[in-house]
Image (cartoon, coloured by chain):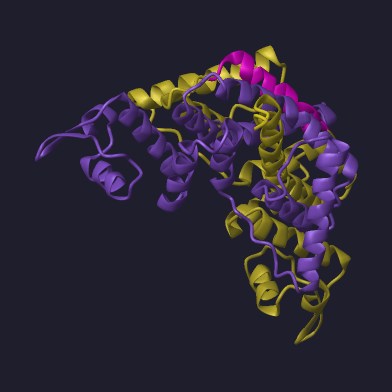
Chain colours: A purple, B yellow
Amino acid sequence: MSERSGVSVASVKYYLREGLLPPGVTVSARKAEYDEDHLRRLRLIRALLTVGGMSVAQARDVLAAAHDPAFDRHTRLGVAQYLLPPHVTAPPEETAEGAAWRERRTEVLALLRDDLGWQIHDEAPALDALTEALITLNSLGYETTTASLRDYAHALRPIAENELRLIDEHPAIDEAIEAVVAYTVLYEPVLLSLRRLAHEDVSARLHPPSST
Amino acid sequence: MSERSGVSVASVKYYLREGLLPPGVTVSARKAEYDEDHLRRLRLIRALLTVGGMSVAQARDVLAAAHDPAFDRHTRLGVAQYLLPPHVTAPPEETAEGAAWRERRTEVLALLRDDLGWQIHDEAPALDALTEALITLNSLGYETTTASLRDYAHALRPIAENELRLIDEHPAIDEAIEAVVAYTVLYEPVLLSLRRLAHEDVSARLHPPSST
């Protein structure tokens, strides 16, 4: 299996020991057989740990949810996304800072849910990251209005639709989760660098070089 | 100055010594006077080093360009953006990997310039970051088509236009550069978390919970 996947024997043994990879079918005392499902699972484990930056415990939770018959596809993919970094910690509830933080989070969730009609879970980690970013901007004197947040959300929605469509081209759950990790994480630099390149273009148009 | 800016005396002295902050007007052997320009500059230095994550040498280059009369506003803002992390290093030119890397970069630049008409400098660091991300995706089996890249670019362009308009509300160059750093860096988590929340909404609609 190590040979076919390019993953070291030590890593494969480690994943077996940690329960990430189910044992193969034992054919003799020193040999077990592994099939295509094992290889696919191994690929997913690598994606969770390396591309996704998850801990072994987090990867184990993703895999458990992926194969729990109580969960539907939306929940299985959602567990994978929720366990991807970053995880922002709110300031303690009893402080003034913590109270303001929670208030801001509630406002943002209301904007997304009531104003845009987005179906978002109360505990979405991305909502914490968003709140934290808006509070930092505010503290430096850069206000973000509801209107501007709505503009960002509208610009990003079609991107998300395309990505989900591509993820859904993988009916097998292990492959779909791998795609969630790959799309979520690896397209982030694509978005951010295209935005910087767009800045450059817009700036060149707004400030053409004075002809000298 | 330390009192009014909230920056420690040790930091102010360090910035003076490193030539980031110009000396105040000496009024006695142990006292110098600082004006509003100094405070504004101090705010910018903090933004470059903390929010922007630049080294002192990089911040010095940004400040030198900002006050070099040979440069126009587009170039001054551009230097600030170019010195913001991340800076991706291409694989060595003489390797097969390096050749493929450069080929991909040329293709992406052609798409942006010829196809979309964007005015992008050959050496834009964001082009390196974009190339690297596309190559990583490719190596994991996730192809990015020209059409999909164009979709991302089109989705991000209006965002960039709004942001540049807000940056241009600051005519003073020190303030404008601070805004470039703040918008570029601090809106990144806003974009990324809104995209993840949009994923969640789209997924919920594509996979409604089966009524049991």
Task: Farthest residue to the left: give it.
Answer: A29
Q: Relative to B21, is B51 above or below? A: above
**Is residue B101 visible in this depiction of the protein?**
yes
Using the image as rendered, state which of residue B13 and residue A177 is in the foreground.
A177
The quarter holding residue A96 reads: bottom right
Residue A180 lies, in percent from the top left, at 54, 32
- Quadrant (top left, top right, bottom left, bottom right) of the C terminus of chain A: top right
Q: Is residue B112 visible?
A: no
Q: Which residues are magenta?
A: B144-161
Q: Quarter of the image containing the N terminus of chain A?
A: top left
Camera-side residue of B74 and B19:
B74
Q: Is residue B88 left or right of residue A144?
A: left
Residue drawn at x 71%, y 34% as measured from the top left: B201
**Residue B35 quadrant:** bottom right
Residue under the point 72% across and 29% down: A198
Q: Is residue B156 magenta?
A: yes
Is A188 one of the magenta-colored residues? no
Decide: is A61 above or below A177.
Answer: below
